[in-house]
């Protein structure tokens, strides 16, 4: 629409409003009372500072892994089973070296063949995935290790100056793992029936490690939905006779022509 046609159309609308005697002044209208803003209320402001931090969830610092060479700094050229075998023997992670699950996992790692399939099917190393989680433009290595306690040990490795480094390690009863951009999202079983934990691990440049930046408990997608209560039957209004409440509105007698 050109300018002349637009001006003509606007003039026609204005003239119609004047002729119709529109009484709307077009001013501002009140939207009602605005609720008063409330700031946060600080509870127990005189609490003393804690003497020790709470128990950490997984590794929050990088750990060097020795004995594994990274050709050309490319983690795609490294056997994931070799990486896990070296890391487990050097860094138990969330396990104690005396734990039965840890000792059995280390023993099973000896069965991993070069093709990562295992000579007897006992190799606990799952398929490896690659994603640039640190933002340096190079793929990092994501490995899952199934353990005898029905948990999944997840470890992430990066390479810096030809040095292999573990930047994340955690073990949990894992339901699923997802990659979203540079975040690693882990779904784990909750002790509360019908719910599960969602933990988002993200790279922290200051700590030089993956940190659990968000942890929440949510309703499981496959959890049974609550049964809605059945609506109670309609009650007749006061003063209505039982025959009135039992007959549908507008119905005719059985002998009437309108009966269906």
Image (spheres, rainbow, N blue to C red):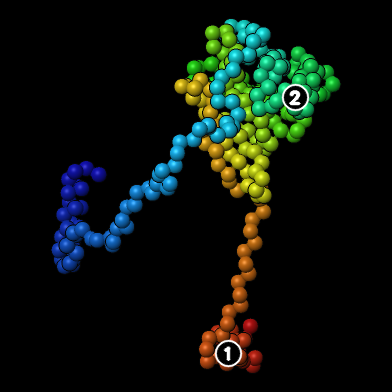
Camera-nearest residue between 126 and 20? 126
Work out whether residue 161 can be spotted.
yes
Q: Which quadrant would the C terminus be assigned to in this image? A: bottom right
Q: Nearer the viewer, mark 1 or mark 2?
A: 2
Work out whether residue 84 can be spotted.
no
Q: In this rendering, is residue 48 above or below 184?
A: below
Is residue 19 toward the left or the right of residue 76 in the image?
left
Q: Position of residue 201 (x, y in %)?
A: 55, 30
Instruction: Residue 102: give its label.
Output: none
Q: Which quadrant would the N terminus be assigned to in this image? A: top left
Instruction: Residue 98: give its label.
Output: 2
Q: Neighbour class for label 2 at 10 Å: few (<14), some, many (≥20)?
A: few
Q: Position of residue 255 (x, y in %)?
A: 64, 93
x 57%, y 36%: residue: 199
Q: Which residue is mark 1?
A: 244
Residue at the far right: name it. Answer: 120
Q: Quadrant of residue 227?
A: bottom right
* Mark 1 vs mark 2, CA separation in Å: 80 Å
Is residue 206 toward the left or the right of residue 231 in the image?
left
- Earlier in the chain: of badge 1 and badge 2, it is 2
x 60%, y 41%: residue: 197
Q: Neighbour class for label 1 at 10 Å: few (<14), some, many (≥20)?
A: few
Q: Quadrant of residue 48?
A: top left
Q: Secondary structure at mark 1?
A: helix
x 57%, y 92%: residue: 241
x 65%, y 43%: residue: 190
Camera-nearest residue between 126 and 209? 209
Q: Secondary structure at mark 2?
A: loop
């Amino acid at each position: 629409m050109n300018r002349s046609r637009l001006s003509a159309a606007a003039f026609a609308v204005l003239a119609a409003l004047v002729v119709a005697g529109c009484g709307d002044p077009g001013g501002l209208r009140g939207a009602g009372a605005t609720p008063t803003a409330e700031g946060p209320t600080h509870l127990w402001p005189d609490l003393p500072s804690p003497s020790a931090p709470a128990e950490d969830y997984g590794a929050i610092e990088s750990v060097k892994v020795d004995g594994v060479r990274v050709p050309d700094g490319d983690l795609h050229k490294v056997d994931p089973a070799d990486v896990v075998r070296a890391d487990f023997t050097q860094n138990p992670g969330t396990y104690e070296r005396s734990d039965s699950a840890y000792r059995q996992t280390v023993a099973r790692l000896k069965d991993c063949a070069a093709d990562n399939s295992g000579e007897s099917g006992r190799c606990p190393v799952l398929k490896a995935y690659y994603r640039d989680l640190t933002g340096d433009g190079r793929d990092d290595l994501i490995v899952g290790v199934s353990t005898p306690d029905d948990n999944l040990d997840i470890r992430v490795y990066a390479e810096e100056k030809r040095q292999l480094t573990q930047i994340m390690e955690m073990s949990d009863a894992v339901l699923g793992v997802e990659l979203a951009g540079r975040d690693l999202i882990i779904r784990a079983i909750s002790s509360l029936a019908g719910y599960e934990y969602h933990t988002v691990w993200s790279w922290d440049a200051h700590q030089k490690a993956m940190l659990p930046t968000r942890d929440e408990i949510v309703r499981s997608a496959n959890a049974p939905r609550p049964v809605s209560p059945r609506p109670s039957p309609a009650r007749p209004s006061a003063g209505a006779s039982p025959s009135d409440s039992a007959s549908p509105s507008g119905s005719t007698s059985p002998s009437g022509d309108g009966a269906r």
